[in-house]
Every structure is written in structure tokens, then in C-alpha cells.
Image (cartoon, coloured by chain):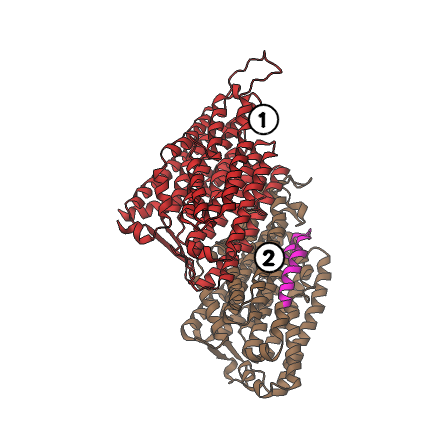
Chain colours: A brown, B red
């Protein structure tokens, strides 16, 4: 049983998804999905433990040896990602039953859980597989289910947002496929491990450069790296709150994982960063993303839009850390992936509570909520502080390491710009705080009550995680450090 | 014995935080709620006194909490400068609580439970700042202090409070995130440690240009020290209820700022290195400019609290000057001024609040003849003004004395001139207030004044702090001894 964990990680949610249809009763389906996601979470913990103790775990699918068969390859990076994804997914599912009552028509509840589990399975597939083509397959599974999840939104603009995402996402996926195809043409293999051995022989060919370019652009589309982020704000804003929370906390992380995996493990750091001007490109785009997206966030009236732009900015931070291309920089990025999942998970889930009670998340609907929904608003304030990077929250830990990595590399101006970015975060989050605590409720909103306890518990679980991992940083730091070290080929 | 001192140190930080819970729970019963605050205040003050005796006996008191980040531990220790700050803060918290009971009830403020709760958090973080064993710990609680005082500043919830709070938070958070944090990370990168050490943490052969730049980052980054151009938050914070202005913006918050400046200059850079840095002189002139400009602005303020706020900006400049003079008398003067100014300014704020509650006046121009109505308050105002100006019988005499000596030692004649001129300016903006209050009101000689002072609790608090100003003049030795031990090597302090 233990030996099969890598494949169970993916198979369990994948098979569970269609099984939901048999259960039919929404309450049962919810419990079932929760159980599945919870067991995926337990599997990912077990895997992380295994990897930490015994090193890389390789699983050959159907007993076919790689590179002929497909192998699942779990190292500390995959295990870390799987832990983030399943952890967030489980907590979000806790709140799902309450939230979708208001946001998704009754007859589509089962469909929602089916799509949710499919999307989860897709993401887990991407992070566990060691096969480049398999990445594409799982990417399509998770993306197609994500498009449909977004389209479930009550707002009719959700359809348009989903369509936008569909077009952009498909272009991205196609690019990735072209990249993988070209690599296959040059090396005759799809196994990542094998690719990394064979690519250096043909590294100086135009085909490999082309493959690399297609792959990077494709991934950056999925990653919503500025300026390829245009699909993201609407998709996040009009999707049901639960979907937004799940995607915001996990989907972009998975894309970033692909970027790291392909550049470091498959092509190798020296090819990606020395042969090609990836570093300059990414540091500029990352910083532009931080500043421009943060400034755009300041002017948003829809709070989901606001935090969506904030996500684009946060992706900018991760890309900056990534582009420093030192162990410290990569470690800061990995750390921020974890931390950002907690922050945005807490924030979007808390927004879901507002959506549940008020039915809208325009800034004016927040007027007076500080009194009416004290626990929800306290969660939003705590999440915002974490986003700003106040000490004793996870945001501070990320920022510390990101700034330190920049300074170690001699990039003082970059360090200043990173910190300036967090000032912009104060500006855009404090607009919500001021609206909630200094204004009187809008007409028609006087009777708003606090969200139900069943919903507040998962919200506060995420908020507590924001504080807990800001105070006890051992787990996140250790895992991020050893993952970064293993990508650079030092340490275990 | 020393173990119990160590737990006392931790309790000084934790008790106020626990009191927050008690305050919220007992919120429905105001008497019980205030009792919780006062008992906590008393206990904390008792512990600080015990710690003071422990320090005096030469015991070394260190507490290590967990490592927040590898190599960066939350740790607390007792050293003389922190002791000064902790003594003042814990004593004045107690006094302010007494005052606040009179004021908040007399003024019918709303949401008093929230007020006392955040007040307690603020004091807990002040204690943590005072006892911080390294710069990292200090920074963390510095930020907690900023955030916990935001709800106090915006207590009334009006549009003006929102605006004031916005300025308050944006300046304090921006400076600390962009400059202070960058300086700390830079120090950590260059020196590899954030411990406070008697000779500073930098290597003697460190690149003075880079270290000098880091000093600039520190001085601007410690926004709570209100060096121009980052002083605007302090006048903005005056929208808060008077007890907040009194304790936080005459003692806790601003003193946390200059305390940090002193700590950083004396124990991160070390005064020897400080003298060598190319940027010290420029920063010294900036602090001097702050002293003069803020005094001039203060003269033009008709609102009493605004005038006091600008006076605070100016007086904080004194401490920064003391720190940057890079001489031992400068550090002594600066750290003594923390205490002297705290007692003087809190009295002045108490008076301002008493005038608001009893006579409902905020503008200085309305206060003519007020001395007949509120003789005790205005007399206290007079004594405290003398202390701020730096003439007997006010404790401010001594701190200004040492600052002057320090500027002579460092041969900073311009600075010395600035200090002298500034004292004249202090006279010009402070003394007219009590003097006019006691002038006869000519327009209406027949009107009889009935004495109507502030609520008794407030009046008692006000008299205590006034007495403090005088006591510090008559009996400054303990303070001086603490101040002069700051620069001594830790071995020497703990040798006995």
C-alpha cells in the first residue's frame, strides 16, 4: 500500500470524481469529496515524510520501466506542492457546502464536486508525474474542469470570463504541447529524467531553443505572469467564491511548479539562465508585475478583482525570487508559494463569507461590516496584514527571505522595489479596512449577520495557519530549503 | 533568584496581553474592567522594579524564546537603556490608566472596552521593545506597536479620525517596511548578527559608505522617532482621545522610536564607528533642523494638542541628536531626556485633556484666565513646561545639560547653538499658555470664577506626573547611573 502512494495521490481523486454522480444527494457528495480530498492530504503528508526520510520516490506505472513507461517521481519539491494543494483543497471543501448554497444553483451541486475533484486530480497529476507528456494531459484535465467551474458562477459575466480563460489557457496549453513535441523530436523521449540527460547533447540547436521558448511562454500564460495575466482578474472575480479560493491558492502555484521543473530539472539551470537571457527578462517582468498589478489593485471597486490583481502582483514576487536563480532566491520563491497559498486562501474564503451574507463584494458593500460581521472582517484584516508582510505572519517570512536573497545577490534596487510593492499592498488592503470600520452600512445592508459557524471555522483555520507558520517557520523553511537545494544539485 | 527574575521579565510582556482577554471578558462591568487594568499595571510595575534591583545587583537576566527564522531568535534581556524605558512606560501606564478612568467617563467616550484592550496590547509590545535582546525582536514588536495603536488613534471613528489614522499608519508602516526592514536585512547580511553589542556589530574595517547608507536607512526607517520629513504622523495622531495622546504619543510610541535610535546607534553601530561614518554629520544637522523647525511650527499652533505634538517632534530631535553626537555624554543626555521629556510631556497632555473635559476648550486663545478656574491644572502645566524647557525645578535641566556637554565633547558648535536657541523657542511656545491663564480677564472683571477642575482621578494622575518632574530634578542619580551604564561593557555591568 505504502509503495503505491504516489499513484494513489492522483488516482483517488480522479476515480472519485465520476463516483460522485452515483451518490447524487448533495450532502453525501460533499462528505464524499471532503473524505477524498482529506485522504489525498494524508497521502501527501505520508509522501513528504517518505521523501524527507528516504529521498526520491520513483513509481513505475503498470510496472513499465522508464523511459518506456510512465513514471511518477516524487522528490521534495513535488511533495511540497502536493501538500499545499491538498491541504488548501481540503479546508476549502469544508466551507464549500455552505457557500455553494447561495452561489450555485441546486441542480449543479453534484456537478460542482465532480469538477472540483477532477481539477484537484489534474493538479496533483501535474506535480507528481515525471513524464513531460503526462504533464500536458493532466494540465488539460485540471484546466478544462477549471473553465467549467468558473462558468458555474451565478453572474452571467462568469461565462465570458470562463471563455476568456479558455482561449488564453488553450493557447498556453498548445504552446506547451508544441514545446514538448519539439523536445520529443530532438531526443526521442518524454521522460523528464531522460530528457535532462539527452537535452545537453542537442542544446545548441535551434529546435531546442524553439521548444524552450514555446514551453516558457505557454507556462507563463498559465502562470498569469504580467503581461500575460489578462485572463486572471475576471476569472477570479466572477467564479463562485469557493472556486476562486481554490484556484487562487493552487492553480498558479502549479504553473510555477512547471516553470521551475522544466527550467531547473529538464533543461538545467545553466542552460536556462546562462545561455538564454531569462534572468533579465523575468526580473523585469516580475517587478513590473508587482508594481503595475498592485497599482491597478488600488483602483478596483470589486474586492475580488482587487485581490485578483494582488495575486498577479504576488506572482511577480515569486518570479523575482525565481529569477535571482540562486538557492536563496529559489527558496524564497518556494516559501512564498506556500505562504501565498495560505494568505490568498484565507482572504478569498473570507470574501466568500461576505458573498454569502451580502451577495456582492463591491467595496461599498463592505461599509459597516466591521460591526456586522466581526469575525469575517477580522479574518480579512489578518489576511491583509499577512499580505503586507507584517511580522508574525507568513508574509513577513517570505519577504525577509526574498529581500535577503536580492541583497545577497547585490541587487539592492530590487530589494527596495520589493519593499515598495508591499507599501502598495497597504494602500489597497486598507481601503477595505476603512470601508468596513469607518462607514455606516449601505441602505438595504443593515440586517447583515455574521456568517454561519460552519463557514467561519475553515476561514479561521486558514487565518491561524497564516499566523502559525509566521511564528513557527520550521516546516515551511526546511522543506523549501531542501527543495531549492535539491534543484541546484546540492545537499540530499 | 535569577530564574524568577526571568519569569518576571516574560510576565511583563505577557501579562498586559493576558489582561486584554480579561478586559474584553469583563467589558460589561466598567469597574471590574478598570480593576483588571489597574491590577495588571501594578503587577507589571512591581516586576519592573524587581528587575531594576536585579540589574542593580549585576545579575544577568536573559530569556530566549523560540527561533522565528534560523539564527534569528526572539530573545529578551535587561540592560540599562531598556530598563529606563521600561520603568517609565510601566509607571506612566499605571498613571495614565488612573487618568483615563476620569477622562473617558468624564468625556463619555464610546467603546471603552476596545480602548482599554488595545491599550494593554500596546503596553505589552512596549515592554517587549524595551527588553528586546536583539534588533530582530525589537523590530517585530515595533510593528506590533504600530498596528495595536491604530485602533486607538482612530478611536472616535469619525472622518477626521480616519484621515489621521491613515497618515499615522501609512507613514509608520512605510518607513518601517521600506527603510527599517531594509536596514535590518542589510545589517544581517553584512554583519551576520543582529545582537546588541557594546562596540557595535560591524567589523572595524567595514565599508563605511555602505554602513553609512545603512545608518541613513535606520534613522529614516525608525519613523517613530519623528525625524523630518517623516514626522507628520505625530500631529495626525492627535485626533486620538487625550489619554492615548498622553501615554502613546508622549511616552510609549515616540519613546519607542528614539529608544530604538539610541539602541541602534550605540549598540549596533557603536559610537566609535558612528564617528567615522560619512553620513553621521548630515543626519545630525537634519535632527537639528527638525528641532528648530518643529519648534517654530509649534509656535504657530493655536490648538493646544497640536502645539504639544510639534513640541514633541522637536524634543524627540534632542534625543536623536544625543544619539548621533557619538559621545558618551550625548548618549547619557539622550537617554535621560527620554525620561525627562516623558514626565514633562505626559503632564502637559494630561492638562490639555483636563481642560477639555472640565472647560471644554481646545484652543490656546480661549484659555485666558483659565488659571482661576483650574488652578491645579494650570500650575502643573507651568511646572511641566519648565521641565521641557530645561530650567529648575524641572528634570529636563539635567538631560539638556548633558546634551550640551555632549555637543561640546564632540565639538559640534552648531549643534550646541541649536540646542540653546531651541530652549528659547520652547519658552516662547510653552510659557505664554500658563502665564496668560493666570492673567486677569479685563473685559469682564465682575465675573466670579468658580473652581471647576477635571474629575478627581485625572487630577490625581496629573499631580503624580508633575511631582515626577520635580523629583527627577532633585533626585536624578538613579537615572544618571542607568544612563551612564549604557555604554559600559556588559562584563563591567555584570562583574559585581
Residue B53 placement (x, y as % from top left)? 30, 42
The reply to whether the magenta stretch includes residue A189 is: no
Same subunit: marks 2 and 1:
no
Residue visible at 57% across and 85% down? A200
Vertical placement of B296 versus B190: above or below? above
Q: CA distance from mark 2 to mark 1?
A: 42 Å
What are the residue bounds of the magenta stretch?
Answer: A284-307
Report whether B36 appears left or right of A210.
left
Relative image position of residue A417 (x, y in whole percent)? 60, 60
Dominant secondary structure (helix, strand or loop) of the stretch shown in magenta: helix
B392, A365: nearer the viewer? B392
Is disc 1 surrounded by few (<14), some (14 to 19) or many (20+) residues within 10 Å?
Answer: some
Find residue B263 and report its horizontal and vertical position in percent: 43, 50
Query: Which residue is labeled 2 in the image?
Result: A420
Q: Is residue A287 magenta?
A: yes
Percent coordinates x, y for residue B172 in the rendering: 55, 48
Q: Are marks 2 and 1 in contact (CB under 8 Å)?
A: no
Amino acid at each position: 500500500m505504502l509503495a503505491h502512494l504516489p499513484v494513489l495521490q492522483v488516482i483517488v481523486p480522479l476515480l472519485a470524481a465520476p463516483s460522485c454522480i452515483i451518490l447524487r444527494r448533495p450532502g453525501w457528495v460533499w462528505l464524499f469529496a471532503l473524505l477524498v480530498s482529506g485522504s489525498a492530504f494524508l497521502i501527501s503528508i505520508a509522501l513528504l515524510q517518505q521523501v524527507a526520510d528516504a529521498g526520491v520516490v520513483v513509481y513505475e506505472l503498470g510496472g513499465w520501466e522508464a523511459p518506456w513507461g510512465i513514471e511518477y517521481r516524487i522528490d521534495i519539491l513535488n511533495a511540497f506542492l502536493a501538500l499545499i494543494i491538498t491541504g488548501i483543497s481540503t479546508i476549502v471543501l469544508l466551507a464549500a457546502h455552505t457557500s455553494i448554497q447561495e452561489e450555485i444553483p441546486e441542480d449543479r451541486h453534484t456537478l460542482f464536486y465532480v469538477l472540483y475533484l477532477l481539477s484537484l486530480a489534474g493538479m496533483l497529476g501535474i506535480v507528481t508525474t515525471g513524464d513531460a507528456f503526462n504533464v500536458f494531459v493532466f494540465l488539460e484535465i485540471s484546466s478544462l474542469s477549471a473553465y467549467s467551474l468558473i462558468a458555474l458562477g451565478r453572474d452571467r459575466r462568469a461565462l465570458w470570463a470562463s471563455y476568456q480563460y479558455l482561449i488564453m489557457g488553450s493557447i498556453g496549453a498548445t504552446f506547451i504541447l508544441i514545446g514538448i513535441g519539439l523536445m520529443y523530436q530532438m531526443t526521442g523521449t518524454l521522460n523528464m529524467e531522460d530528457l535532462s540527460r539527452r537535452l545537453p547533447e542537442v542544446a545548441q540547436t535551434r529546435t531546442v531553443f524553439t521548444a524552450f521558448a514555446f514551453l516558457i511562454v505557454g507556462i507563463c500564460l498559465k502562470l498569469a505572469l504580467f503581461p500575460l495575466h489578462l485572463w486572471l482578474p475576471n476569472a477570479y472575480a466572477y467564479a463562485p467564491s469557493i472556486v476562486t479560493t481554490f484556484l487562487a491558492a493552487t492553480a498558479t502555484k502549479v504553473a510555477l511548479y512547471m516553470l521551475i521543473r522544466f527550467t531547473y530539472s529538464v533543461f538545467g539551470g545553466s542552460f536556462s539562465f546562462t545561455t538564454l537571457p531569462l534572468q533579465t527578462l523575468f526580473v523585469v517582468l516580475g517587478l513590473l508585475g508587482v508594481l503595475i498589478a498592485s497599482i491597478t489593485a488600488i483602483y478596483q471597486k470589486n474586492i475580488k478583482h482587487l485581490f485578483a490583481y494582488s495575486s498577479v502582483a504576488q506572482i511577480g514576487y515569486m518570479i523575482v525570487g525565481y529569477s535571482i536563480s540562486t538557492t536563496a532566491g529559489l527558496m524564497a520563491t518556494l516559501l512564498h508559494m506556500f505562504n501565498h497559498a495560505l494568505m490568498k486562501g484565507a482572504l478569498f474564503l473570507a470574501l466568500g463569507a461576505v458573498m454569502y451574507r451580502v451577495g456582492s463584494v463591491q467595496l461599498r458593500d463592505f461599509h459597516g461590516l466591521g460591526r456586522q460581521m466581526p469575525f469575517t472582517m477580522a479574518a480579512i484584516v489578518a489576511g491583509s496584514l499577512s499580505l503586507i508582510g507584517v511580522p508574525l505572519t507568513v508574509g513577513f517570512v517570505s519577504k525577509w527571505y526574498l529581500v535577503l536573497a536580492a541583497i545577497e545577490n547585490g541587487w539592492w534596487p530590487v530589494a527596495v522595489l520589493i519593499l515598495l510593492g508591499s507599501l502598495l499592498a497597504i494602500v489597497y488592503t486598507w481601503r477595505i479596512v476603512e470601508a468596513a470600520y469607518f462607514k455606516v452600512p449601505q441602505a438595504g445592508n443593515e440586517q447583515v449577520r455574521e456568517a454561519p459557524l460552519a463557514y467561519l471555522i475553515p476561514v479561521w483555520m486558514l487565518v491561524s495557519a497564516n499566523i502559525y507558520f509566521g511564528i513557527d517557520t520550521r516546516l515551511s523553511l526546511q522543506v523549501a530549503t531542501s527543495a531549492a537545494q535539491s534543484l541546484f544539485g546540492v545537499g540530499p | 533568584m535569577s530564574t524568577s527574575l526571568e519569569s518576571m521579565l516574560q510576565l511583563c510582556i505577557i501579562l498586559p496581553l493576558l489582561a486584554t482577554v480579561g478586559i474584553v471578558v469583563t467589558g460589561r462591568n466598567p469597574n471590574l474592567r478598570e480593576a483588571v487594568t489597574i491590577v495588571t499595571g501594578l503587577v507589571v510595575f512591581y516586576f519592573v522594579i524587581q528587575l531594576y534591583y536585579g540589574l542593580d545587583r549585576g545579575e544577568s537576566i536573559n530569556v530566549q524564546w523560540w527561533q522565528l527564522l534560523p539564527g534569528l531568535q526572539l530573545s529578551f534581556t535587561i540592560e540599562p537603556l531598556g530598563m529606563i524605558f521600561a520603568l517609565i512606560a510601566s509607571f506612566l501606564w499605571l498613571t495614565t490608566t488612573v487618568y483615563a478612568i476620569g477622562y473617558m467617563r468624564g468625556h463619555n467616550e464610546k467603546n471603552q472596552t476596545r480602548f482599554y484592550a488595545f491599550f494593554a496590547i500596546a503596553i505589552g509590545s512596549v515592554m517587549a521593545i524595551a527588553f528586546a535582546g536583539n534588533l530582530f525582536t525589537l523590530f517585530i514588536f515595533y510593528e506590533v506597536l504600530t498596528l495595536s495603536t491604530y485602533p486607538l488613534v482612530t478611536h472616535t471613528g469619525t472622518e477626521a479620525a480616519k484621515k489621521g489614522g491613515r497618515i499615522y499608519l501609512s507613514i509608520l508602516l512605510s518607513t518601517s517596511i521600506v527603510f527599517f526592514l531594509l536596514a535590518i536585512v542589510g545589517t544581517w547580511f553584512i554583519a551576520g548578527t543582529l545582537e546588541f553589542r557594546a562596540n557595535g556589530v560591524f567589523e572595524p574595517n567595514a565599508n563605511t559608505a555602505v554602513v553609512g547608507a545603512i545608518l541613513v536607512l535606520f534613522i529614516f526607517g525608525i519613523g517613530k522617532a519623528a525625524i523630518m520629513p517623516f514626522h507628520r504622523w505625530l500631529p495626525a495622531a492627535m485626533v486620538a482621545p487625550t489619554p492615548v495622546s498622553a501615554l502613546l504619543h508622549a511616552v510609549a510610541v515616540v519613546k519607542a522610536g528614539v529608544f530604538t535610535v539610541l539602541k541602534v546607534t550605540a549598540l549596533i553601530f557603536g559610537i566609535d564607528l558612528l564617528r567615522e561614518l560619512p553620513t553621521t554629520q548630515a543626519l545630525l544637522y537634519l535632527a537639528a533642523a527638525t528641532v528648530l523647525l518643529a519648534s517654530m511650527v509649534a509656535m504657530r499652533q493655536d490648538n493646544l494638542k497640536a502645539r504639544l505634538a510639534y513640541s514633541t517632534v522637536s524634543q524627540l530631535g534632542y534625543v536623536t541628536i544625543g544619539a548621533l553626537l557619538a559621545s558618551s555624554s550625548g548618549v547619557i543626555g539622550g537617554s535621560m531626556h527620554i525620561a525627562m521629556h516623558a514626565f514633562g510631556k505626559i503632564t502637559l497632555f494630561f492638562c490639555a485633556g483636563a481642560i477639555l473635559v472640565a472647560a471644554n476648550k481646545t484652543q490656546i486663545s480661549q484659555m485666558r484666565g483659565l488659571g482661576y478656574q483650574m488652578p491645579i491644572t494650570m500650575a502643573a502645566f507651568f511646572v511641566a513646561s519648565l521641565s521641557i524647557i530645561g530650567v529648575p525645578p524641572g528634570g529636563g535641566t539635567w538631560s539638556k545639560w548633558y546634551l550640551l556637554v555632549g555637543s561640546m565633547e564632540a565639538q559640534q558648535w552648531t549643534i550646541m547653538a541649536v540646542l540653546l536657541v531651541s530652549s528659547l523657542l520652547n519658552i516662547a511656545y510653552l510659557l505664554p499658555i500658563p502665564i496668560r491663564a493666570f492673567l486677569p480677564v479685563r473685559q469682564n472683571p465682575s465675573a466670579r470664577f468658580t473652581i471647576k477642575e477635571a474629575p478627581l482621578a485625572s487630577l490625581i494622575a496629573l499631580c503624580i506626573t508633575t511631582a515626577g518632574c520635580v523629583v527627577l530634578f532633585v533626585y536624578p542619580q538613579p537615572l544618571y547611573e542607568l544612563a551612564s551604564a549604557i555604554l559600559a561593557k556588559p562584563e563591567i555591568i555584570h562583574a559585581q
